[in-house]
Amino acid sequence: MREIKFRTWNKGSEEMHCDWGIDSSLGSALWHRMFANVSQSKAMSKGYDLPKWYEHFKGYVFMQYTGLKDSNGIEIYEGDLVSYQKRNLDRAFGEGGGEEYLSFISEIKYRDQGFNVPQGFIVDLKVIGNKFENPELLEGD
């Protein structure tokens, strides 16, 4: 079973805060995650009661730990940018040329009840930054 923990990006101070583990803030973190893109008025119009602590978490973006580490042992979180090399299967199966491995950069996202961490014929998976502190790495993506 993977460890459940979060880190947060403070929108106001533009700082990353790490290691929000399971404690009394977990319910707050999960609730906020559900409504991260919903304004207070929109949530209330849908009939959701906003907890009193909502205002405290409103300025944060929560990112969950994937339970995985990169090639250097660095924990991979939602919002991280990773570089990796993927085997060129066309070349491997003799159906094309080019490099044996192709280089990619991806943003880790939570989708369809899971994280899109690259898997398969990959090598050298490395966390190279995150979308908040290193947005320039996403340019051209």
Image (cartoon, rainbow, N blue to C red):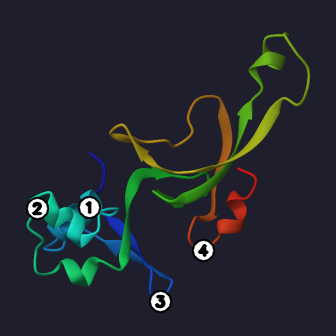
Q: Nearer the viewer, residue 97 or 56?
A: 56
Q: State the separation of the CA atoms marked 4 and 3.
A: 12 Å
Q: State the separation of the CA atoms marked 1 and 3.
A: 21 Å
Q: Amino acid at mark 2?
A: Tyr
Decide: is 106 above or below 134: above
Q: State the separation of the CA atoms marked 2 and 3.
A: 28 Å
Decide: is 91 above or below 59: above
Report the residue at 58% width, 65% height from top: 130
Question: Residue 69: where, in percent of width, then height?
Answer: 50, 53
Q: Amino acid at mark 3?
A: Ser
> What residue does disc 1 label?
35
> What residue does disc 2 label?
48
Q: Secondary structure at mark 2?
A: loop
Which of the two discs, 2 and 4, labels the residue nearer the N terminus? 2
Nearer to us of marks 4 and 1 is: 1
Q: Quadrant of residue 102?
A: top right
Decide: is 23 above or below 100: below
- Pointer 2 with pointer 4, Cβ within 8 A: no
Question: Residue 93: where, in percent of width, then height?
Answer: 79, 11
Which of the two discs, 2 and 3, labels the residue nearer the N terminus? 3
> What residue does disc 3 label?
13
Q: State the separation of the CA atoms marked 2 and 1.
A: 10 Å
Nearer to us of marks 2 and 3 is: 2
Q: Quadrant of residue 114?
A: top left
Q: Quadrant of residue 135?
A: bottom right
- Pointer 2 with pointer 1, Cβ within 8 A: yes
Q: Secondary structure at mark 4?
A: loop
> What residue does disc 4 label?
133
Nearer to us of marks 1 and 3 is: 1
